[in-house]
Amino acid sequence: MDSLQRVFGKNAAYWLIGPAALWLAVFFAFPMLSLLTTSLSDPAGSPITGYTLTWRVQNYIEVLGDYWPYMMRSLLYAGIATLLCLVLGYVLAYAIAFKAGRWKTVMLVLVIAPFFTSFLVRTLSWKLILADNGFIVNTLQTLHILGEDGRLLATPFAVIMGLTYNFLPFTILPLYTSLEKIDPKLNEAAADLYASPFQRFTKIVWPLSLPGVVGGTLLTFIPATGDYINASLLGSPNTQMVGNKIQQLFTTANDYPHAAALSVLLMAIIVGMVLVYVRRAGTEELL
Amino acid sequence: MSLADQARGDLKLTGLHKRYPNGFVAVESLDLVIPQGSFFALLGPSGCGKTTTLRMVAGLEEATKGTIHIGDQDITYARPYKRPVNTVFQNYALFPHLTIAENVAFGPTRRGAKDPAKEVKEILALTELTEQAAKKPAQLSGGQQQRVALARAIINRPDVLLLDEPLGALDLKLRRAMQIELKRIQEEVGLTFVHVTHDQEEAMTMADTVAVMNKGRIEQMGAPYDLYTNPQTTFVANFLGRSNLIKAKVLGREGTGADAVVKVDMHGTIATIKASKVHTDSDQGWVGIRPEKVLIQPEGQAIDAPGAALSGAVVVDASYIGVSTDYTLRMPWGQEITCFEQNTGRRGGLIPVGTKVDVSWRPEFAFLLDSSQDVEAGLEED
């Protein structure tokens, strides 16, 4: 600290915080402000002529009235995908943290490996896997699990599966970090103190992994709620999520104020849910 | 208050053997009976198998061969959570998300105790932790955490309490205080304590019986006094305190009964050793003598010891410690031996380096070990 004081003088702390503050101002505060003003502007304008800020709160009421089913569907799909990610991810993260031995690093690399290919390409490849005359659908039809003209593609199943697949690593990594930090001796101590394997999990491992559970589910739920790639590539018009609507409002309808209002609304709902969730999980220190 | 309210039994290890998949034998055919209610120490250097033995008793490691009994009950293959055994872990392994009271209540709650809160209160009082009950482990000092680990284990009134280097993480001063504390608690609750440690002073201070372990076997077992004054192997002689070991030829036996002695020739000087302290049948051996039993006197002055003196030694180093002085002496045959002399003031100063001295000791303090054993066994590497 002394040497820092010598270089920066008395106000070392302000100088050091500078770059981060600037970054936040340019890439967070300014876009945020722009989004808020657009959401309260008159939709009569156009992206070329610009919009005038008229504090038009009706934008919010209108998007809520028009798009609330999509909002609910987004929360439902993202919620189911997050739960699936948690179950699958917990099992895998637990195995990597406690049972993998010398395969730990290899398994972690495999978890991250999908990131080396584009999100879009990976989702597109699921389109081929789930295609109507693809191997999986044919097999399920032969086994009479799917009907003669049953499909997987363009169903809620495909969208939720896509979300689960794409966001699983975001659940696994925080879970792994939390589980990996648990001293295996604690498990032995619990066993020594008459806890059965099941009790060792519920009383020791689960509570100590809660930060990872909360972190992992947030990192999955938040982007999954706003996602539109999975719904547009694997879904049908009946499975559209709020992200698809925002995208359409911005790009097809050129209606920036309503698009912005829907975005802000989605953000507000997610922030509210996150606050309640983190409170209830007792992991406020994450915030 | 005595917690030992029902008949339990001795802890009996029979032919206990642990071989790891990689072929390493950690514990080799161990036979051991630890009487109920005793404070027993397993002492040895790291890797000697003491912790593996403890973990097998706790059920955290499975025995390859052999059996473990408490009284008549065979617990060799019982699951850890079904054994009447509790452990105080090295570094304590306290549950970080639970309060001290919750940590201590963990065992009784799992076993469905009728009134865990009352038991917890009693144990916290015994271990002087009442004021810390609502705190989390991270808020406590090392000594307090140690007591929580102890409280968490003894509240279950196990037949056997296992302590795995319980004081290893504490500084010297606190360690001394906790040694006395542990001993007090053991006497108060009357449980069988099995204490694993590499610290010979700790083992000797606390335990009624010490078993010295080396390479998966018990080298020698007995009361601290017997182990120290009559070690049977070079390993015990070196690991438990320090010893001067001098090569000698065995000449023969004289006398009978308690007066029987063995005569040896140490580089030309004849000495006698009590037959009860002779642990070799061969015609060669190591004469062992503890440094504080070695008496020295500048050449020509009388030594207060019966029997012959070794002459021609030279003082090569004198370290003044305060209560005592450590002398290093070079013997005429080149070996260096150590002498700790209490600074009673009789000498009126130190013997200067370079002085020629005579060396002797009272014959009853010497012991004779087998010459085939490594003279450096049990010396600490650091």
Image (cartoon, coloured by chain):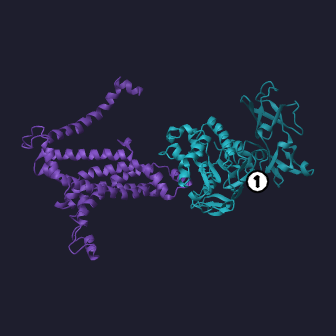
Q: Is residue B35 rendered to the left or right of residue A166?
A: right
Question: Residue B88, image x and y in percent?
Answer: 59, 48
Q: Is residue A210 above or below residue A159?
A: above
Q: Residue at x 68, y 47 (%)?
A: B2
Q: Residue at x 28, y 73 (%)?
A: A145
Q: Is residue B379 rendered to the left or right of residue A72?
A: right
User: Chain A in the picture: what colour?
Assistant: purple
Q: Is residue B93 rendered to the left or right of residue A116?
A: right
**Rendered-image quadrant of the N terminus of chain B:** top right
What is the chain letter for disc 1?
B
Looking at the rendering, which quadrant does residue A26 occupy?
top left
Q: Residue at x 21, y 58 (%)?
A: A231
Q: Which chain is cyan?
A: B
**Rendered-image quadrant of the C terminus of chain B:** top right
Question: Residue A94, image x and y in percent?
Answer: 43, 56
* Residue bearing mark 1: B372
Asked whether residue B113 appears in the rendered view, the answer is yes
Residue B248 vs residue A36, the one in the foreground? A36
- Residue extending farthest to the right is B255
Asked whether residue B48 appears in the rendered view, the answer is no
Residue B275 vs residue B114, the one in the foreground? B114
Q: Is residue B217 above or below residue B166?
A: below
Q: Mark 1 Cα within 10 Å, few/some/many (few <14, many 20+)?
A: few
Looking at the rendering, which quadrant does residue B33 occupy?
bottom right
Residue B276 vs residue A261, the one in the foreground? A261
Question: Residue A21, image x and y in percent?
Answer: 28, 33
Q: Residue at x 22, y 71 (%)?
A: A150
Give the amino acid at mark 1.
Answer: Ser
